[in-house]
Image: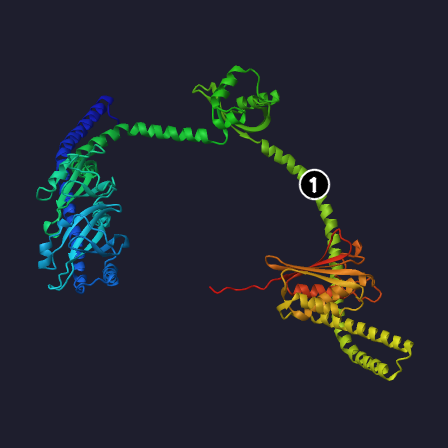
């Protein structure tokens, strides 16, 4: 059940009246609270001014007491030793470094010594302020007054120096203290005031002389130049009239109402009276007023809560039914507008009554209203095949519903798309057809996917045939590689056993040749030639045996830091048949170190250099070795100017037993690759425009672990 509109209106008027009453009460309370809070804030500012005055007085009293103690050391009678005076002043200045300068003067004001050498011999003005009679009676008399100098406002503190009464010496210590040194006291008080507020506030403070001139100012920075008495500021006159307090006044510069707390420094501490002003805008008190008003409003709300709750409950009940209706309508509208499928209502005459955004976009329109208007004007059907549209309508009229009817349409931009349509025939109670409601799904991509799938199937069949042939070829390569690896394994085992069996007789033959060379006559050149040939063949056979053993054992490297330059020079000096060739080294930096096994590294470069020398056929040539440090690898290239390697042989040069040379055994490069890869590196033949052969070698650098 819902309430009548007139009753609802009366309830709303009643609620408004209650809230207006609350606002009137709050407004009356505001003025009282404002006056109370302004008074409390003024008292707080006055208390801050009193605290600042006491802090300044305490600070100056500490300086007085310190100077009084430090000046108890008497100066010798008729002492004119400038060095002694300066030492006396430096000792005091070391204990009290906050003073700008210290000066020693006589009763006439003449400066006898000073920490500022430029003042020595000058006369201090206004010395009449010092009570000389009192100085002669006691050493505890002191006076302070302010003086304006080039460095700013200075406080001059006069302290008598202890001297023998019969010495006739009357010396006075004058200590200059910048008045700005007292600003820290004001800043601490300002921070204390700020801590009492939740939000940042604007606080100003000033220190005044009796004539109203500013000694310290937090804003204007016009010390000694501005007189607040001349500006007729009430606080400047009240501060020197008696007890501390506060006053409401208008800020002359900013023209805003402010609260000013004031206090006077105790007169017994200074030669002059000073006043302290602490000022805050009255607007800074408003947040506290608002907070208090909020608390009062909360209390009133608690009192009126039952009545307001009843009124709100009645109002909510009045609108509950309408809200439920709006909620359901909103839900259905969201479903209608957010649905990714097209939704429509169409009259039997063909006129569109309603479409959602998805269907409008499907037919090429930006807005549903544009599609409805276009279909009401045009006579041409968007279906590409009119017979499909006729078949759709015939099935719908006979069966009353159609599911997944596919047809091709043309959008307003001329683009052709495929749709799947599901529709229902809505009838009246009498059974007469009224209109059509349906959904439309864009299946263009699905139709394209079906065509693409068929094409992909055809391509897949063709690829399967190609893949079958490719796999067959790869399997054949794998089979050949397995056969070769098996043969190499057997060759390694056989080579190891044969090498051990051949080394003993080969050593015996070497010894016989050595003995024959010693016993036979050296004049017979033919015999010596044959013996040399035998030694060369024995050495070659021994090298083959060493290579076979190296390949069969596959010894792990014992790594260390190896100088590449020394290894290359050593290998080159023992490389045979290089008389007309020369070695060129380009190693950066020098010396160049590799992290590897030195013996295995020598074997790698011995095999490569022997191949390079043999490729140059004893003709003048050059073997160039370059080395550089990469980020993580050491890169070495070795290039010769020989005949090079044929393109047909490049893929087989690292295979065991592959060699075109008559005296080659085909194991050198195989062993090189085996050694480099055991170091974690790579070796490959590079291609370039420069004639000859170039091998690229990469060795991992030593990993240095840093302590955490």
Question: Tag 1's secondary structure?
Answer: helix
Relative to 369, is 328 above or below?
below
Residue at image coords 12%, 60%: 139
Relative to 427, is 237 above or below?
below
Answer with the quarter of the image where residue 641 lies: bottom right
In the rendered image, the quadrant that contains the N terminus is: top left
Relative to 1, is 115 above or below?
below
Query: Quick one: 211 or 475, which is closer to the camera?
Result: 211
List the single residue furthest toward the bottom: 519
Instruction: Tell me if 381 is positioned left or right of 93 in this view.
Output: right
Residue at image coords 10%, 51%: 268
The percent coordinates of residue 513 (x first, y second) are: 84, 80
Instruction: Tell me if 461 is positioned left or right of 559 in this view.
Output: right
Query: Quick one: 229 or 136, which is closer to the camera?
Result: 136
Instruction: Tell me if 355 is positioned left or right of 157 in this view.
Output: right
The percent coordinates of residue 544 (x first, y second) are: 78, 71
Disc 1 target residue? 459
């Amino acid at each position: 059940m819902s309430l009548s509109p007139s009753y609802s209106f009366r309830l709303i008027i009643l609620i408004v009246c209650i809230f207006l009453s609350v606002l009137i009460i709050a407004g009356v309370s505001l003025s009282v609270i404002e006056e109370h809070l302004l008074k409390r804030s003024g008292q707080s500012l006055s208390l801050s001014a009193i605290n600042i005055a006491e802090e300044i007085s305490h600070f100056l009293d500490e300086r007085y007491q310190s100077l009084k103690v430090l000046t108890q050391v008497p100066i010798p009678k008729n002492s004119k030793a400038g060095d002694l005076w300066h030492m006396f002043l430096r000792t005091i200045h070391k204990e009290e470094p906050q003073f700008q300068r210290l000066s020693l003067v006589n009763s006439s004001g003449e400066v006898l010594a000073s920490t500022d050498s430029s003042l020595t011999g000058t006369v201090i003005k206004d010395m009449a302020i010092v009570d000389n009679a009192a100085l002669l009676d006691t050493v505890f008399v002191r006076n302070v007054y302010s003086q304006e100098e080039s460095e700013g406002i200075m406080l001059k503190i006069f302290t008598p120096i202890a001297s023998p009464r019969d010495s006739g010496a009357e010396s006075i210590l004058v200590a200059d203290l910048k008045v700005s040194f007292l600003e820290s006291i004001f800043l601490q008080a300002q921070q204390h005031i700020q801590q009492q507020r939740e939000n940042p506030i604007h606080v100003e403070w000033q220190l005044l002389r009796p004539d109203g001139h500013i000694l310290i100012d937090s804003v204007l920075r016009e010390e000694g130049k501005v007189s607040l008495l001349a500006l007729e500021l009430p606080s400047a006159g009240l501060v020197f009239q008696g007890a501390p307090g506060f006053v409401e006044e208008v800020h002359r510069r900013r023209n805003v109402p402010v609260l000013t707390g004031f206090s006077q420094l105790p007169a017994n501490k200074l030669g002059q009276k000073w006043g302290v002003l602490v000022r805050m805008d009255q607007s800074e008190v408003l947040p506290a007023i608002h907070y208090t008003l909020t608390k009062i409003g909360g209390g009133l709300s608690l009192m009126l809560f039952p009545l307001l709750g009843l009124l709100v409950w009645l109002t909510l009940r009045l609108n509950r039914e309408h809200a439920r209706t709006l909620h359901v309508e909103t839900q259905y509208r969201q479903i209608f507008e957010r649905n990714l499928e097209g939704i429509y209502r169409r009259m039997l005459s063909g006129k569109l009554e309603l479409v959602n955004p998805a269907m409008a976009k499907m037919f090429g329109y930006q807005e549903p209203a544009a599609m409805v208007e276009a279909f009401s004007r045009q006579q041409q059907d968007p279906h590409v095949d009119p017979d499909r549209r006729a078949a759709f309508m015939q099935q719908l009229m006979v069966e009353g519903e159609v599911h997944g009817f596919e047809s091709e349409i043309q959008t307003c931009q001329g683009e052709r798309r495929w749709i799947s349509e599901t529709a229902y025939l809505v009838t009246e109670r009498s059974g007469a057809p009224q209109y059509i409601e349906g959904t439309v799904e864009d299946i263009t991509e699905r139709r394209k996917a079906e065509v693409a799938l068929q094409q992909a199937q055809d391509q897949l069949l063709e690829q399967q045939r190609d893949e079958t042939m490719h796999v067959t070829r790869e399997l054949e390569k794998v089979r050949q590689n397995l056969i070769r690896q098996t043969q190499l394994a057997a060759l390694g085992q056989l080579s190891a056993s044969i090498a051990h069996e051949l080394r003993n007789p080969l050593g015996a033959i070497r010894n016989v040749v050595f003995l024959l060379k010693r016993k036979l006559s050296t004049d017979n050149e033919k015999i010596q030639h044959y013996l040399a040939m035998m030694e060369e063949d024995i050495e070659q056979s021994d090298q083959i045996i060493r290579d076979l053993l190296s390949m069969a054992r596959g010894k792990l490297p014992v790594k260390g830091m190896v100088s590449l330059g020394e290894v290359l020079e050593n290998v080159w000096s023992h490389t045979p048949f290089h008389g007309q060739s020369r070695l060129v080294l380009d190693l950066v930096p020098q010396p160049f170190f590799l992290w590897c096994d030195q013996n295995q590294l020598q074997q790698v470069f011995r095999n490569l250099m022997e191949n390079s020398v043999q490729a140059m056929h004893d003709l003048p040539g050059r073997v160039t070795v370059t080395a550089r440090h990469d980020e993580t690898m050491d890169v070495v290239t070795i290039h010769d100017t020989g005949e090079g390697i044929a393109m047909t042989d490049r893929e087989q040069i690292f295979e065991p037993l592959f060699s075109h040379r008559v005296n080659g055994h085909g194991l050198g490069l195989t062993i090189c690759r085996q050694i480099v890869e055991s170091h974690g590196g790579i070796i490959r033949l590079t291609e370039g425009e420069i004639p000859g052969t170039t091998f690229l070698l990469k060795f991992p650098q030593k990993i240095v672990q840093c302590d955490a």
